[in-house]
């Protein structure tokens, strides 16, 4: 796009530990990666948005003088504008181009990065100070993508994309957030090229875990998803129907593993091999109990580990999408092995959060 006046971008994310925890109010450990989605625009003289999305071969055009009707189930570009319009943000028309390097609908938070970047673009365009506040961007991203459409997802992706770096978030009340040290080296993030059903997967897991917890609470008054995994709790879980049993147990084991991961990042010396072993342990829970892996992703993970990765796991809601491997020593070799197993690999590092690009970047 010529004559760009404003350009912003937000990163995708890896869920290091804590997959399927945020929407239960539990903790996650996530990291932003240097695959990003960017909105570049020039102001129009009328009150319309004309948005080109060349990566997916689409174009959107709409005005915003009244409530904008949704043309699809998850019409995120319009939902953000509706949210800001209701809040009386001073909106103006723009020609916008959207481009990205995050694998789309593959478990690396492409949609969340998009809504975070789009909200930042709208706020920056209006001169609103919330454009520089990652928490505001994360909350607006969640409202745009999840709350507006009554979806079952959580806030992990929005917070990871808005803040960047390595983050530990406990999604209880009140929510607690910590930026963690970043001792991490390179990763290989790889798309299996298998499509997934994020909302269907989330809805199935959420309903069965909550139902299982309620059944355990009938036997053990006061039981919650934050209760210790005692012998008594394990015995009660073992009496549940199969899907409730495996999903509740997987949720509690992931909870405890995520807490150990946070301790590792906060320790005096980061043990890279221990971190890799934690990734493997987390994947084992996701594969065997949550059952969200696929044969192809398993082949990609085996190839990465055989090529020297210290650990690997599926990334995102599962049933397809991406995996990643921690490969601080020889990422090129790991990437080649994953590609040979049928994946589309990207060598990535931890990156910063949502940002307004410099004038030099805008002029490119």
Image (cartoon, rainbow, N blue to C red):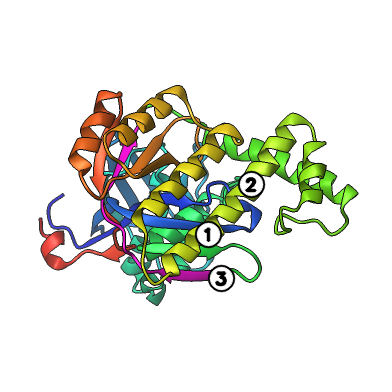
Q: Nearer the viewer, residue 339 or 5?
A: 339
Name the residue: 32% across, 29% down. 303
Per the image, label 2 sits on a secondary structure element best described as helix
Residue located at (49% from left, 65% from top): 263
Instruction: Give the magenta-colored segment's residue range.
Output: 176-191
Give x and y (percent) for residue 81.
Answer: 45, 56
Residue at 34 percent of width and 42 percent of height? 325
Secondary structure, mark 3, is: strand
Residue 211 position (above or below residue 22): above
| Residue 119 visible, this angle | no
Label 1 sits on residue: 260
Question: Which residue does the numbered mark 2 point to in the structure image?
Answer: 251
Please report contact status of discs 1 and 2: CB closer than 8 Å, yes or no: no
User: Overall secondary structure of the magenta stretch?
Assistant: strand
Any magenta on residue 317?
no
**Above or below, comparing residue 230 to residue 346 in the picture:** below
Q: Could you say which is closer to the camera, residue 212 or residue 136? A: 212
Of residues 206 and 255, the one nearer the viewer is 255
* Front position among marks 1 and 2: 1
| Quadrant of the image occupied by residue 161 | bottom left
Mark 2 vs mark 3: give the one in front: 2
Pinpoint residue 157: horizontal percent, then vertical percent: 46, 53
Of callouts 1 and 2, the N-terminal one: 2
Residue 76's x, y, as percent?
46, 47
Image disc number at residue 176? 3
> Can you say whether 289 is above or below 2 in the image?
above
**Residue 115 in the figure: left or right of residue 176:** left
> Label 1 neighbourhood size at 10 Å, few (<14), some (14-19), many (20+)?
some
Label 1 secondary element: helix
| Furthest-bottom residue in this view | 129
């Amino acid at each position: 796009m010529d004559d760009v006046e404003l350009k912003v971008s937000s990163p995708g994310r890896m869920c290091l530990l804590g997959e399927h925890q945020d929407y239960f109010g539990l903790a996650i450990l996530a990291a932003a990666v240097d695959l990003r989605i960017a909105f570049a625009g020039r102001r129009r003289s009328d009150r319309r948005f004309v948005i080109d999305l060349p990566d997916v071969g689409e174009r959107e055009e709409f005005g915003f003088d009244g409530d904008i009707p949704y043309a699809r189930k998850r019409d995120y570009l319009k939902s953000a504008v509706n949210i800001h319009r209701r809040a009386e943000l001073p909106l103006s028309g723009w020609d916008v181009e959207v481009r990205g390097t995050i694998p789309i609908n593959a478990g690396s938070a492409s949609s969340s990065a998009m809504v975070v970047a789009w909200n930042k673009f709208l706020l920056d365009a209006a001169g609103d100070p919330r454009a520089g506040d990652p928490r505001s961007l994360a909350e607006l991203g969640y409202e745009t993508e999840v709350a507006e459409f009554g979806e079952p997802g959580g806030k992990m992706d929005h917070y990871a994309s808005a803040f960047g770096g390595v983050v530990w978030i406990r999604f209880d009340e009140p929510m607690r957030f910590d930026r963690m040290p970043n001792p991490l080296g390179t990763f290989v993030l790889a798309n299996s090229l298998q499509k997934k059903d994020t909302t269907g997967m989330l809805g199935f897991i959420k309903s069965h875990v909550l139902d299982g917890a309620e059944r355990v609470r009938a036997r053990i008054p006061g039981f919650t998803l934050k209760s210790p995994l005692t012998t008594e709790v394990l015995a009660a879980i073992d009496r549940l129907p199969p899907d409730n049993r495996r999903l509740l147990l997987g949720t509690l084991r992931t909870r405890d593993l995520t807490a150990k991961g946070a301790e590792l990042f906060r320790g005096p010396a980061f043990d890279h091999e221990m971190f890799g072993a934690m990734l493997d342990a987390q994947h084992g829970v996701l594969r065997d109990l949550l059952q969200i892996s696929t044969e192809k992703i398993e082949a990609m993970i085996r190839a990465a580990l055989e090529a020297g990765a210290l650990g690997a796991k599926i990334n995102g809601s599962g049933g397809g999408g991406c995996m990643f491997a921690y490969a601080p020593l020889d990422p090129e070799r790991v990437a080649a092995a994953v590609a040979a197993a049928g994946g589309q690999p990207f060598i990535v590092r931890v990156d910063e959060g949502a940002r307004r690009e410099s004038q030099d970047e805008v002029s490119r």
